[in-house]
């Protein structure tokens, strides 16, 4: 995803990526957040609307900043869910 984001940025389209795996650092996306969530729950624990909103807000806030930025590591981690 980071390579696609960089190509879009070169065309003048602002991008932001959120990921769960530290390997995203290898592709150096222009703007990105990294969560401690497990695979498949990048934007938050199912049914935890507040957590999902925090992750989404932090990620989208990066669009207002000039790129490239260092990857922002969020403290969000998996919570209890049913």
Image (spheres, helix red, strand yellow):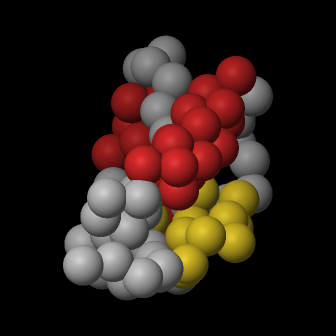
**Residue 17, horizontal then vertical, whole percent:** 46, 49
Q: Residue at x 65, y 44 (%)?
A: 58
Q: Report whether 73 appears left or right of 17.
A: right
Hey, which residue is sitting farthest top in the picture? 12
Above or below residue 77? Residue 74 is above
State the image quarter where residue 62 is shown: top right
Q: Is residue 79 visible?
A: yes
Depth check: give the residue in front, 78 or 67.
78
**Residue 4, horizontal then vertical, whole percent:** 33, 45
* Image quadrant where one finds the C terminus: bottom left
**Residue 55, horizontal then vertical, whole percent:** 55, 51
State the image quarter where residue 77 is shown: bottom right
Q: Residue at x 41, y 42 (%)?
A: 5
Q: Is residue 31 visible?
A: no
Q: Residue at x 33, y 77 (%)?
A: 81
Above or below residue 39? Residue 54 is above
Q: Residue at x 49, y 16 (%)?
A: 12
Q: How many numbered tags mark residues here?
A: 0
Depth check: give the residue in front, 3 or 79.
79
* Image quadrant where one finds the N terminus: bottom left
**Residue 27, horizontal then vertical, whole percent:** 47, 65
Depth check: give the residue in front, 72 or 38.
38
Q: Report whether 74 appears left or right of 14.
A: right
């Amino acid at each position: 995803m980071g390579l696609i984001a960089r190509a879009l940025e070169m065309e003048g389209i602002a991008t932001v990526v959120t990921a769960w795996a530290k390997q995203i650092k290898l592709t150096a996306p222009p703007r990105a957040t990294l969560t401690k969530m497990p695979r498949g729950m990048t934007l938050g624990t199912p049914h935890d609307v507040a957590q999902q909103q925090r992750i989404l807000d932090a990620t989208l806030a990066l669009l207002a900043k000039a790129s490239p930025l260092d990857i922002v590591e969020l403290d969000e981690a998996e919570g209890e869910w049913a």
